[in-house]
Amino acid sequence: MIVRERLDNGLCLLTESMADVRSVAFGIWLIRGSRHESAAQSGIAHFVEHMLFKGTSTRSAQDIAQEIDSIGGQLDAFTAKDCASYYVRVLDEHLPRAFDVLSDLLLRPVFDSDEIVREKKVVLEEIKMVEDTPDDFVHELFTQRFWSGHPLGRPILGVPETVSSLDHDALCDYFGRVYKADNLVVAAAGNVDHSAIRDLVASAFGDVPASGETVSLSTPVGVAGLQLREKSLEQCHLCLGVSGYPQDHDDRYACYLMNIVLGGSMSSRLFQNIREKRGLAYSVSSGLTAYQDCGALTVYAGCDADAVSEVVDLVVSELQSLRDKPIHPEELRRSQDHLKGNLVLSLESSSSRMSQMARHEIQFSRQVALEDTLRAVEAVTLDDIHRVARNLFRPGALAATVLGPVDRLRLSGEQLGVT
C-alpha cells in the first residue's frame, strides 16, 4: 500500500512497503526541469545536477562515491524537461547511511569554482556525444524545430554558449530559488516502514523552507514541415511527428494503444512493413512524449539515403490508414495484452515502484492504482482509437527531420501533406 504524507513545509513524502524484497529504492525528485529555465541559462538545471555530486561541505566527490560503493549501493541522477531526480538503491540495512549521503547532496552542496570549471568540460563533451549519436541527435533536432521558440524545444544539456557562461553565483542563485521543500517529492519503495522513513526525512528536510515562487508555463504549438540537416553518416536518420496529448488527457490510454499498433512493438505495422517485409531499416519505431500541458507522437527510422523517400511514404501511409479506418479487433486485443503485460512486469523492482510513485505525484498530483490503469486499458474500444487517430493525424500536422547525407535526397513537403 502507498502512503502519502505532506510535511508542514510542503514536501511530499511517498512510501510503498514491499515485504518480499531486501532492497530499498529511495529518490528525491525536484518538480523543476529544463523547461523552467530562462533561455540565457539554458542547461543550468542539468549542470546543477552534475555539481551536486562534486562535493558537499562534509564530503568530497570521492567520499560520496566511496561511501556508496562500500555498501554495494547504486547512486545516480537525471534531469528531464519537467523534473530532476536523485536516487539510490541499497540493501534495507544500509538505508540510513545511504539516506545520509543522498540528503547531504541536496542540502549542503558547495559549488566549488575549480570543480565548476572542470565540470563545464565534462558537460561540453556530453553535448558533443549527443551530436555524435545520430539516433539521439535527430530527436533533439526535431524537438528544437517542432517546439521552436519554447523552453520545451531547448536541449536539456543546454548549448555550449550558455553552459560556458555559468558560474558560482548563477548556480547558487538557481539552487537557492528552486531547491525548496514544496518543489520536492521524496519517494521510497522496498522493505521500508513509513514512520521510519518519515523520521529520516523530517529530521533532514523539515527545516527546508517552501519556495513561494510561482512558475507560469506557456503551452507550445507544434510546427509542421520538413527539416534537412547534412551530416557525414552512413545512414539517414528520420524523425516524423505530430502534436500529442498531455499526461492527464482522457484519451491517453487509447493513444498508448494506438502507438503500439503503429510502431511500439515488434508486431506493429511500421516494424512489419518497413523492416520485416521490405528490409528498408534495421531500427524503426514510434513513441510518445507527454508533459503537463502538451505532448508529441514521433516515428523514428534509420535507413539508407536512397530509401528515405520510400520510408517516409510508408510512414505517412500508415498514419493515413489509422486516420481513415478503424484498426482490426485482433490488433486492439494484442496491443491491450502487450501494454498490460509491460505495465505489470515493469513494476517488479523497488526502483520502478519508487519511480512510478514519484512520477504519478508530479504528473497527476495523485496516485493511480495499477488495477485502475489495467481497467482503463481494457475499456478502450476500436472507436476510441479511431477517434484519436483522426484527431492527431490531421492533414498538415506532420513534421519531419532528416539527419545524414541529405544532399542527394528527393524529398519534399508534399510527401508529408503539409503544403
Image (cartoon, rainbow, N blue to C red):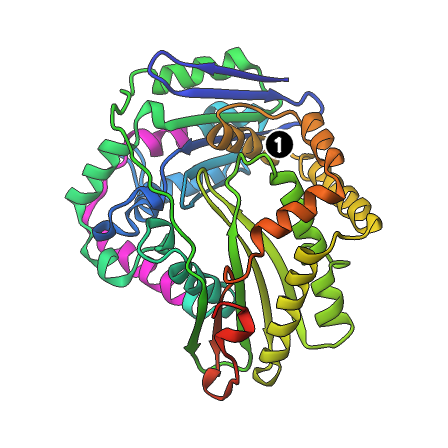
Residue 379: where, in percent of width, then height? 74, 33
Foreground pick, 172 / 411: 411
How many marks the image carries: the answer is 1
Task: Say above or below: 286 vs 295.
Answer: below
Residue 118: where, in percent of width, then height? 26, 56
**Which residue is depicted at the point 41% across and 68% down?**
131
**Which residue is depicted at the point 58% across and 78% down?**
308
Q: Which residue is mark 1?
A: 350
Left or right of 356 on screen, residue 11: left
Residue 257: where, in percent of width, then height? 69, 46
Residue 101 among those drawn in magenta: yes
Task: Say above or below: 143 vs 85.
Answer: below
Residue 328 among those drawn in magenta: no
Residue 172: where, in percent of width, then height? 20, 38
**Which residue is depicted at the point 34% across and 32% down?**
106
Residue span colored magenta: 100-129
Q: Quadrant of residue 407?
A: bottom left
- Inspect the image, locate mark 1, and give the three-letter code of the amino acid beneath it: Ser
